[in-house]
């Protein structure tokens, strides 16, 4: 989708970015892997990106655990509203934070976010696999930014 700033926080496999299978699946985005950063904590990753709007991602219900009730905004609406408010002389930096495939984001990590975004799904089964969720968020953001080479 043209985004190039990838950060991983405490990945299970610390050598994931150098794995042959990961590099093969990068399909035209090897530069993203080569320039990716690995952080030991979410705090470290957030602190490394000043003046960034921190967007947590998740679903409003969790089938497996009790969660603190939060307000979730649809990504497409949030991105549209944000770009409507943007002044032409100021760049907006966003950090989209995704939790683990199996358990999503921790409540303590959600507390660090400026806003929570969620893809509307079936309320009885709101779970998406991680790659699908990332692709949907990236698509919605890309649709708002546009497709010019300058926007990458």
Image (spheres, rainbow, N blue to C red):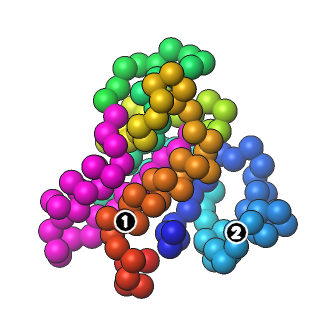
* Dot placed on the residue nearer the N-terminal end, 2 or 1: 2
**Percent x, y for residue 55?**
38, 46
Image quarter where the C terminus lies is bottom left
**Percent x, y for residue 12?**
74, 44
Separation of residues labelled 2 and 1 (CA atoms): 22 Å
Residue that badge 2 annotates: 26
**Percent x, y for residue 130?**
61, 45
Question: Going by the picture, which residue comes out furthest to the top?
Answer: 66
User: What residue range appears in magenta?
Assistant: 72-99
At 31% from the left edge and 29% from the top edge, which residue is drawn?
Answer: 71
At 47% from the left edge and 59% from the top edge, which residue is drawn?
Answer: 138
Residue 101 lies in quadrant? top right
Crowding at dot 1, Cα within 10 Å, few <14 / some 14-19 / many 20+, comes out as: some
Crowding at dot 2, Cα within 10 Å, few <14 / some 14-19 / many 20+, comes out as: some
At 66% from the left edge and 33% from the top edge, which residue is drawn?
Answer: 102
115 in magenta: no
Question: Going by the picture, which residue comes out furthest to the bottom?
Answer: 149
At 62% from the left edge and 51% from the top edge, which residue is drawn?
Answer: 131
Q: Residue 151: give its label.
A: none
Residue 94 lies in quadrant? bottom left
Indicate which label's residue lies in the foreground, 2 or 1. Answer: 1
Residue that badge 1 annotates: 143
């Amino acid at each position: 989708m043209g985004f190039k700033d990838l950060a991983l926080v405490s990945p299970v496999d610390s050598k994931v970015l150098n794995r042959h299978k990961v590099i093969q699946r990068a399909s035209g985005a090897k530069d993203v892997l080569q320039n990716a950063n690995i952080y030991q904590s979410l705090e470290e990753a957030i602190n490394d990106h000043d003046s960034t709007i921190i967007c947590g991602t998740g679903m409003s219900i969790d089938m497996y655990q009790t969660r603190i009730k939060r307000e979730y905004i649809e990504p497409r609406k949030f991105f549209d509203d944000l770009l409507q408010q943007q002044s032409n002389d100021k760049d907006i930096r966003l950090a989209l934070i995704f939790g683990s495939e199996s358990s999503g984001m921790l409540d303590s990590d959600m507390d660090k976010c400026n806003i929570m975004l969620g893809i509307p799904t079936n309320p009885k089964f709101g779970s998406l696999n991680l790659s699908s969720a990332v692709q949907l968020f990236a698509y919605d953001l890309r649709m708002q930014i546009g497709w010019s080479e300058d926007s990458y």
